Amino acid sequence: MAWLLVKNGIRVAIIERHPDFSREFRGEGIQASVVKHLDELGLMDQILKKGMGIRAEAARVFFDNKPVAVLKGIDGNTDFGLILHQEKFLAHLHEKLSESPLYTSYLGHNATQFDGKDEKIVSVRIADKQKKEQSISADVFFITTGRGTALRKKLGMKSFKVATHWNILWILLPEPEQKELLPKGFRAYLNGDSLFIMYTNSEGMIQLAWGRRDENVLKQRDFDQRKSALLSEIPRQYKTLIERGYTQASRSQFLKVECDRLHQWHKKNVLFLGDAAHTMTPVAGQGINLAMRDSIVAANHCIPLLQNNHPIDQIVFHNIEKERIKEVKMMQKFQQKFGYFMLGAPKWQSKIFFLILLPVLKKVGIQKRMLRKIQTGVSDVRFEHKS
Ligand SMILES: Cc1cc2nc3c(=O)[nH]c(=O)nc-3n(C[C@H](O)[C@H](O)[C@H](O)COP(=O)(O)OP(=O)(O)OC[C@H]3O[C@@H](n4cnc5c(N)ncnc54)[C@H](O)[C@@H]3O)c2cc1C
């Protein structure tokens, strides 16, 4: 969002609670719909050249360690998408934007409160690590603070839950000696009781997401017990990697995977976008994609008004939400249904879905149509201004 606004001559201040862009674990899978946008922004070459991302050849799904689906790019020959290293990518955007006098950043500052009168928020209060407060004034506020953001409550925003099937333990594993263990993109191993989603990150390491019907083991404090549970469930070809590569020092984080949506994405002169407006689960790697596409649509509507010092009223925000809501609803519904079969359903149902229903859907062409929407997006999003 900041990139698009600054590139179009609009003054922006960003507030990020971390001192840099090295972040909590988060998904990095980018679909074809957003690879296209990154290309249009002229960023794809740099992403690949500077190691900010690597191409994801395919997403492969296994049930009981048997392959059940291989998802390639839109036309079946191209890559499935991209694994974008958020830390490096965001740091790159920040570095480039910092060259502009229009861009100010408050890294290491937490946005805590809004101040304003009845009709308008005039400033946001931010605090650094030492709890030193200051106020940042602005005409418009875009809230992109992700899942579980406390800023929803500060503005009295109401949301409803779409789904929660399972939570996840992220584990970062070293590069395996056997190269065939490295996914050329994504792999999902399911068996009805636990799931493993893995991909190769831009450093050649394996990023592993472990979900489980009984999640207590994921939160287990005793490392040895957790490791032994992991060893008993991980597909056998990965056992040696876990034995040698999963240690007390391995980076790891438990993540709550909820899916929800605000009733209305805006209030006064404040607009929520991305996970802050509609929190996505990791199913089918949609959240980053939707967040970026939200920003493009919001920028399309706001740029001409901001360039001409025109106020942005509720109708503008309403129109942004209206343009985005269809895609968000459909993707959340898909995440809810597919996520259920990945882990929430009784094991026999998951088995029937992945081993019988999915191949039938493929035969009659439904799987392809469904996937097309997942990969290319539901709505037609395009840049209307300088990108
Ligand atoms: C386990 C897991 C795997 C996933 N895998 C994928 C995937 O492969 N592909 C995909 O597309 N999506 C994936 N997702 C979803 C995806 O991570 C999110 O949908 C996406 O990151 C949302 O982007 P965002 O910019 O809205 O929010 P975020 O990426 O969450 O960014 C929010 C930012 O705001 C900052 N912040 C928060 N509060 C404050 C505050 N008060 N003040 C200042 N700064 C603040 C945070 O530090 C953070 O940098 C996954 C999700 C999970 C849980």
Image: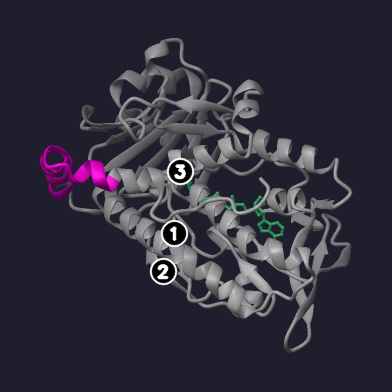
- Residue at the spot x=18%, y=52% of the render? 346
Circle 1/circle 2 CB separation < 8 Å = yes
- Residue 63 visible? The answer is yes
Q: Residue type at mark 3?
A: Ser
The tag on residue 258 is: 1
Magenta-drawn stretch contains 212: no
| Mark 2 element type | strand
Dominant secondary structure, magenta: helix
Q: Position of residue 285 (x, y in %)?
A: 43, 44
Give the distance between the C-alpha atoms of the residues marked 3 and 2, in whole angstroms. Answer: 26 Å
Give the distance between the C-alpha atoms of the residues marked 1 and 3, in whole angstroms. Answer: 23 Å
Residues in magenta, as a range: 348-370
Q: To which residue does mark 2 refer?
A: 161
| 50 w.r.t. 131: above or below | above
Quadrant in the picture for residue 182: top left
Q: Position of residue 165 (x, y in %)?
A: 34, 56
| Mark 1 element type | loop
The answer to which of marks 1 and 2 sits earlier in the sequence is: 2
Q: Residue type at mark 1?
A: Glu
